[in-house]
Amino acid sequence: MGMIKTFSSLVLSVMVFWAPATLAADKDAAWLHYGGDQGGRHYSSVANINKENVDDLDVAWVFRSGDMETHGKKMENTSAQSTPILLPAAAGESLVYCTPFNRVIALDPALGTQRWQFDPKINLQGDRTFRCRGVSYGLDVNTSETQACRHRLYVATHDRSLWAIDAKDGKVCENFGINGQVRLYGKEGFVPGDVANSSAPAVANGVIVVGSAIIDFARAQAPRGTVKAFDAHSGKPLWSFDPLLNQLNSGAANVWAPISIDVENDLVFLPTSAPSPDYYGAKRPGDNHYANSVVALNLQTGKLVWHFQHVHHDLWDYDTPAQPILFDWKKNGKTIPALAQLTKQGLTFVFNRLTGEPLWEITQQPVPPSQIPGEYSSLTQPKPMAPPPLIDSFLMPDDAWGLTPIDRSDCKSQLEHINNMGLFTPNSEKLSLMYPGSLGGPNWGGGAMLADSGVLLVNINNVAFTGQLIPKQKDAISSKKDHPEAGKRMRVAMNGTPYSVEIGSLKSFLGIPCNPPPWGKLVAIDLVKGTILWEAPLGSIHEMGPVTLPFHVDWGTPNLGGGIATKGGLFFIGATMDRQFRAFDVSNGETLWKYTLPVDGNATPMTYQYKGRQYVVINAGGHAIFSRGAGDYLYAFALPE
């Protein structure tokens, strides 16, 4: 590791491409990256809004992108996931975000009025959900201060282009790629929707790293999930990394979640997904390295430094769903550069991010074998000794839940007749428990670190799913969705295999989940002590029934989107299926403030201070999976002036 640190120090001293300390007096006070910082901590040291005054928080401004008017019916197939960033003063000090159709919009941070927009005019073909989680900023020292595009924004689009535009006016950087864009598709070809992009590129030290979002479930050999790196000035290719290089009969294992970078040590951390097909692995024997892993590469060369696989031979679609979180582990007078990785299974793994050494011991737990002919599932799966699992996946018939004895009896009967051997129960031709389901547990919203305290706040789904492998005679038509829509089951083809698979939530005849609530919750974890500090329900079901109730019922809801923590002792989050934007007390999970948005806010919020006033901003546009309506709103909140 000494050679790596020496090399990265040399690169930094020669290139001096990225110097975050010069952008703000306190790096935590700015929100210059999707996750607040390059390590995805989702934390701000701004504390003007705090536990004592948050009840006075009110709408400062509302901006509408115009997508509802422009795209009409296509809005039903969108998810508004973008988290804005605030540019430094030298770059124009605009608040910048992207719409689901990859339009980049710059706003006045105080007024919410538009300054400029950039429209890449993406190819709208295909059935994949349109989404854009954010744009990335980079300072190009190879461009002089008097030239355009010294301050750049990078966006990776749905139709697989990487664009560089001037952060000050949104005009393309013509010396980047060809007229400002680099086409990302390669040997996999290009079919609109088969391969897309959702998360913001990762940019540091003169390098851009881009993952991909690859179609799930449809066929045995999906496109390759190759991660690509480019020169941030010219767009020239630098290196690529294929997590499944030696798995010729598979594909995917792509990186669709946000990527993290340790700028000082010149390391990039990739959260890789499941190999294809997601629920049948007979044609991809072995552990399928480096799928379902966190992978550390040298940022300049793409060479492997270390990796850890949290699911061997995945049969459950347990992608690595969230950005690796970089923080300082402080214990017994020592400080260790650390990385925390959340998984869909509800597990939290913590490592020395320079070496990959686990900071909590990891054991290999025996798991049930597959009963499918030709399928050789892994005999064990990794589990950390601490912290505890965020979900108790042990769900027996006597644990069944219901509003009445009748629907509880229905759930109990279902649990008595399904294949259920706990976490990592492999799918079979008999209906099998999947708990948690493919949405998690944690998902792309990730977690929020309370400074460098080692305390992590994370929102999770807590709904049991079931799955079943269904023999087929020929290739079938697959669902057009990424995951089951709320309350529905989904059959997907897995063409090229002997099976289709049907998945969906485990619910009673009333449509209510069979596992006890809360069905969404917020959890506070002390990563250093290895303990759960508190839990709180996240979401109210008052709008989820056939009739909207006039009061909240805080049993938690499925949720997608993340939260942010602040020095003011607050945790802000939307994410739920009730249109609420909430502020929690980070010390105990008490709800201190909430606001009803016009549609669900399934995006991660952000906060910034501008001209002495703190703002909290969230994108409210709904999510196609939840089928609760779409919108094109960006809401900013502040205390009264």
Image (cartoon, rainbow, N blue to C red):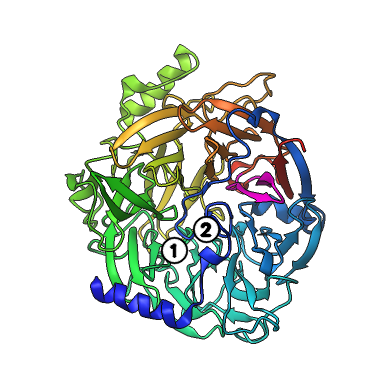
Q: Nearer the viewer, residue 42 or 71?
A: 42
Disc 2 target residue: 477
Res 635 seen here: yes
Question: Which residues lie in the magenta part?
Answer: 602-622
| Residue 400 x %, y % | 38, 22
Which label lies toward us, 2 or 1? Answer: 1
Q: Earlier in the sequence, mark 2 or mark 1?
A: 1
Tell me how far mark 2 sits from mark 1, CA to CA.
26 Å
State the image coordinates of residue 160 (x, y, percent, origin top left): 58, 72
Q: Nearer the viewer, residue 147 or 214?
A: 147
The image shows residue 478 at horizontal and vertical percentages of: 51, 56
592 or 7, nearer to the observer = 7
Kindly identify the amino acid type of the residue bearing the numbered disc 1.
Val
Relative horizontal placement of residue 503, taking residue 80 as reference (left or right): left
Q: Is residue 52 magenta?
A: no
Q: Which residue is mark 1?
A: 255
